[in-house]
Each structure stands twice: as structure tokens, then as C-alpha cells.
Image (tube, grey):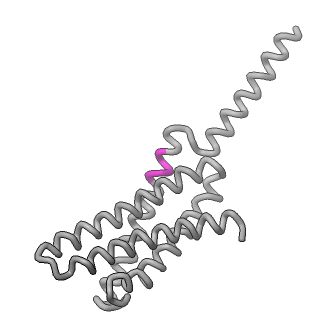
Amino acid sequence: MSVRVKQVLTVAGVLFVIYALSRFVVWLTRHSKHGVGWNEAAGYVAFGGIAVVMGVVVFRWIGRGLAGDVLPRALVALLIGCAAAVLIGPFAGGTYPGVDGAGSFFNRVWVILGAGILGGLLGLSYAISVGRDYRTQSLRRYEADRTQKARTKARRA
């Protein structure tokens, strides 16, 4: 298995674990008198965690390759993680995927994808703004090479 496939599957696994843990917390607090607050908090934390993970992943990966290579890999990781979270994650909470109906099921899909894409875009924009993306780094290397060549020509003269 190649390194890229392992990276994608690792990110998808982390996204699945975040969502499954939130479902498990909901299951643990289902009979609590404060259960509704815990349910909402677990959901917010899960979707925030998904956004943070995707932001960090895109930020780290964008420095190693072009955006045309990195962003599709990150999107595939998000899609696999979302499919696993929505189809397998409810079992961690003692239910099954379609227990609340199709509307709730697709709502979870869109919220997970939205949080992941938003986090990825924030990671990408931050990487570009601080100059950590591959294109900016290659332009810096090119500039340093050209400056070095100009200095060596000036010394010879």
C-alpha cells in the first residue's frame, strides 16, 4: 500500500473516530436529566473536531505538493471518513444509520461534508497566507537560486 493511500485512510479513520466518539457520548448520556445539553455539545465538538482535523491535514499536505494533487486526496479522505461515520458511526450510539429517517441521515452527511470542506478551506487559506504552500516555497527557491547566480556572476567580474 502506498504512502498516500495510508495517509488518506488514516485521516478517514480519524474522522470516523471523532464522530463515533460523539455518538458514544450521546449514548452514555441518553438517560441523564441533562442529556439534551450533552447531545448538542457532543455534536458541536464532533463537527468542530472534523473541521480542525481537515484544516490541519490540508495545511500540512499543501506544503508537500501542488494543490491539484493534495486537495483531491483530502476530499477523498473526507468522503471516506464521512461515509464511515454516517454508516457505521451510529452503531457506537446503540442505533442504526436510518433510525431518524432519510432527512436526518442526509443532514448528517451534509453537515459533516460542510464542516470538513470549511476546515480544509481555512487550512488552505492559512497556508497560502503564511507562505507555506508548495507554489510559494518553489518561487522562494527559484528566487534564491537566481540571486545566488547573480552574486556569483558579480564576483567573477
Q: Residue placed farthest to the top in the image?
A: 157
Q: Residue placed farthest to the left in the image?
A: 33
Q: Quadrant of residue 4?
A: bottom right
Which percent across, then down, holds residue 133? Answer: 59, 45
Report the residue at 32% width, 82% height from top.
93
Dominant secondary structure, magenta: helix
Q: Is residue 147 magenta?
A: no
| Mark count | 0
Screen quadrant of the N terminus? bottom right
Which percent across, then down, holds residue 130? Answer: 51, 38
Judge from the rendering whether residue 124 lies leftward or rightward of residue 25; answer left or right: right
Screen quadrant of the C terminus? top right
Q: Residue placed farthest to the right in the image?
A: 156
Which percent across, then down, holds residue 30? Answer: 20, 81
Where 143 falls versus 86 (above or below)? above
The residue closer to the viewer here, 64 or 29, is 29
The residue closer to the viewer here, 60 or 150, is 60
Report the residue at 22% width, 77% height from top.
29
Judge from the rendering whether residue 148 lies leftward or rightward of residue 99; answer left or right: right
Report the residue at 43% width, 64% height from top.
116
Which percent across, then down, holds residue 144? Answer: 71, 27
Q: Quadrant of residue 143?
A: top right
Q: Write down the region rendered in magenta.
A: 122-126
